[in-house]
Amino acid sequence: MKFLALKLALRLSWRKARPLTQLTTALALLSTALGVTVMLVATSATHGFEDEIQRRLTSLAGDIEVQAIGSDTASWVLPAADPDVARLMQAYPVIELAVPVLMREAILRGPLGLEGVQLKGVGPRWNAPFFARHLTAGTLPDFTGPQASRDLLLASRLAARLNLAAGDSARLYFWERGRVRVRPVRVAGLFDTGLYDFDGQLALCDRRLIERIQGSDTGYAQAIELHLRPGTDSRTLAQTLDRLLPYDKQARSASERFPELYSWLELQHQNVFFILALMTLVAVLNMSTALIITITERTAFVGLLRVLGATSGLVLRIFAWRAALLVGLGVLLGNGLAYVLIYLQQETGLVQLDPESYFVREAPVRWVWGSFGRINAVVMAVATVSLLLPALIVRSIRPVVALRHE
């Protein structure tokens, strides 16, 4: 008879079991559900955190940077309208934006004194939507006018140290050709990305302002930042572009330019792997305990089946199905609870983090269905196979002794 083991496993009613068995089974289900919930939430939070940090970093510095080999902050040897970059953008539509940038150190003077600042000069096309999302005060500067704009977009931390607010005037000091040059500027807006190690001293300005300080309107840049379509593998594409560029130019992904940050993000995955292994072990141990108690309670049932001609294999399959059903129910409950928690965090940002340590104020989450499916499959497979070991107890039960049990 097909599926006889499954049908008999379904007839092992939990409600008719002894109180101890009910309690043990309930605790095993609860531990499995909570374990799966922790695994799914941890995976979602890790992927969400990694994606958010990478998105902020690449929005600040580009997914890929094209630079002339041997160039530095004093030599602008890359054309702002570089023909090689234009050709690559046509060949690879995933490159959504190319931003030629100039970098220049300066000193910014405010009401509370002086601070070193890293000026980043951009042109009419820059990653304005990203900075608009992280704007804390004021407005975005307009770099599209016929004349060089004197507006700055300033990191909020830097502005706070100088007691500068949106709309305030300030002065920039440059050391150029053996003498100090001064430029009056206006703080158009303030931004805060949370990546203080990368933008704590940053000020965005019109690249023509830096060119005039340099003393020539050259139309050259130190680097061209390439911003890619979301989901693009920047490492692989950077390697491809690097091979296609002439010998005097190179393309580097963000992971090559900021290896420390990416190594730190990789460590988060190791922590999640430890959580996955630990929660799976806890679920297996609890389910094993519940199954052993169930088998002990059903000793007479096992003896009756053996007397009626059931093989040890059939009895073993009955309890294996019983174990699989319990694990499946626990996994199902864990998934439901995890999805509710992830959705609530995504919609409300209930869990807050310290931006000083984690760079973000709200714990980011992400729906990673592929990882969710793999976790569920591994838990089901490992738990079910592991529960076959305690189920082997039925092989040692003698029918005569079992029928006397009760």
Image: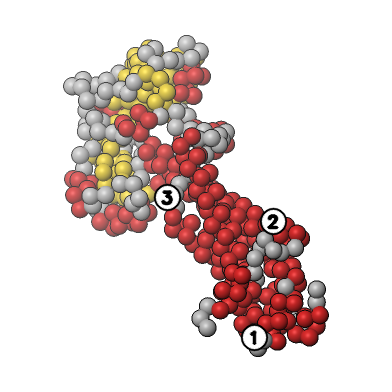
Evaluate if marks 2 and 1 touch, with contact meaning CB atoms under 8 Å apart: no
Look at the picture and state if 259 lies above or below 223. below
Residue at image mark 3: 256
Residue behind mark 2: 27
- Answer with mark 1 or mark 3, whichever residue precedes in sequence: 3
Q: Which residue is mark 1?
A: 310
Report the front residue among 218 and 33. 33
Residue at 35 percent of width and 28 percent of height: 132
Point out the tag, 3 or 2, that comes first from the N-terminus. 2
The percent coordinates of residue 70 (x first, y second) are: 34, 45
Residue appearing at x 25%, y 25% in the figure: 143
For this view, does 114 lie left or right of residue 177? right
Comparing marks 3 and 2, which lies closer to the viewer? 2
Number of other residues with Cα within 10 Å of mark 1, as a class: few under 14, some 14 to 19, many 20 or more: few
Question: Between disc 2 and disc 1, whose residue precedes?
Answer: 2
Question: Is residue 368 visible to the viewer in this orientation of the structure?
Answer: yes
- Residue 399 in the image: above or below residue 209: below
On-image quarter of the C terminus: bottom right
Q: Are marks 3 and 2 in contact (CB under 8 Å)?
A: no
Q: Disc 1 on helix, strand or loop?
A: loop
